[in-house]
Amino acid sequence: MPLTIHFNGQLYLHGPYISVLQNSTFSTQPNGSTFDFGTIAAGTVTSRAWIINNSGTRTLTITNNTSLVSGNGFVQIETPPSSIGANGGQGLFRVRFASTAPGTTYNGTITIQSNDTGQSPWVIHVTGRSN
């Protein structure tokens, strides 16, 4: 016979608990997922922001907050705090995509190292194209 547990109230996660939202849609950006910047004209730039959320009961520490982004064509232009408070604390970071050569596909990675032992690193692959 299966065990069923019912509860009312809120679920509290002990320790830090990271999640990442794509700021323009406020949708969760899952760990290991890909975000597509789309196609922009060669020689132009665009940027997007993400929100790091901590729904845990302890401070979330981001150990690489000044170096989240790697890859050709992508650069971090806004830095989240190194400490994000518990119970809904948030930090924002922004990534710029700059295309230089027509017909080129660019790929990069956002890697968030934290003290959330169950979900570190949090990785988002980024891609974009120029025309």
Image (cartoon, rainbow, N blue to C red):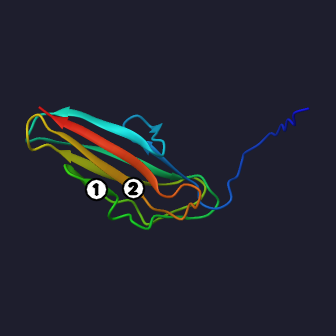
Residue indicated by mark 2? 111
Q: Quadrant of the N terminus?
A: top right
Q: x, y percentage for residue 8?
A: 80, 39
- Furthest toward the right, the residue is 1
Q: Which residue is rendered at x = 14% and y = 38% of the image?
A: 104
> Which structural element holds mark 2?
strand
Above or below — where is 39 with respect to 22?
above
**Image quadrant containing the C terminus:** top left
Query: Where is residue 81 shown, x and y percent of the image?
Result: 41, 63
Q: Secondary structure at mark 1?
A: strand
| Residue 53 x, y percent position in the rendering | 51, 51
Residue at (40% x, 34% y) in the render = 25
Q: Which mark is residue 70?
A: 1
Q: Residue 41, image x and y in percent?
A: 11, 34
Residue flagged by tag 2: what amino acid is it? Thr
Q: Is residue 57 left or right of residue 5?
A: left
Q: Is residue 16 left or right of residue 33?
A: right
What residue lies at 8% left-to-right and 36% top-to-bottom?
Answer: 102
Mark 2 and mark 1 residues within 8 Å of each other at the beta carbon: yes
- Residues packed near mark 2 inside 10 Å, few (<14), some (14 to 19) or many (20 plus): many
Q: Residue 114 vs residue 11: left or right?
A: left
